[in-house]
Image (cartoon, grey):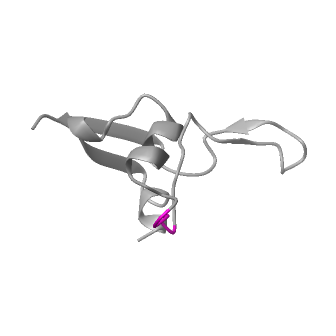
Amino acid sequence: PRLMSLVPDIHIALVYEDNIYESFDQIISTQRWSENMPTNALLISGPSKTADIEQVLAYGVHGPKELIVLILTS
């Protein structure tokens, strides 16, 4: 399951409006991570990039090629 968000070509995320926070600190506080931290948290800020092969910069090497986010209202 951890790899499921990284392996497919298209990642479709269903997010409840109530689960959108202003900052990462707010998530940690609201969900009380100090008491029971999750085993995995992914922070996706944009397409991946690497220059591992022949020192040539390549974008979008890791993870899905397309991200679709559907925001669900309560």
Q: Residue at x 42, y 28 (%)?
A: 22
Q: Residue at x 51, y 39 (%)?
A: 24
Q: Position of residue 71 (x, y in %)?
A: 22, 35
**Residue farthest to the right?**
54
Q: Residue at x 58, y 36 (%)?
A: 47
Q: Is residue 73 left or right of residue 67?
A: left
Q: Which residues are magenta?
A: 35-39
Q: Is residue 71 left or right of residue 43?
A: left
**Residue farthest to the left?**
74
| Magenta segment includes 19 | no
Q: Main secondary structure of the magenta part?
A: loop
Q: Nearer the viewer, residue 15 or 65?
A: 15
Give the quarter of the figure containing the N terminus.
bottom left
Q: Position of residue 56 (x, y in %)?
A: 84, 38
Give the quarter of the figure containing the C terminus.
top left
Residue 59 vertical placement versus 54 (above, below): above
Q: Residue at x 48, y 43 (%)?
A: 65
Q: Nearer the viewer, residue 63 or 37?
A: 37
Q: Position of residue 12 (x, y in %)?
A: 30, 47
Number of callouts in the render?
0
Q: Quadrant of residue 4?
A: bottom left
Q: Position of residue 37 (x, y in %)?
A: 50, 64
Residue 41 vertical placement versus 15 (above, below): below
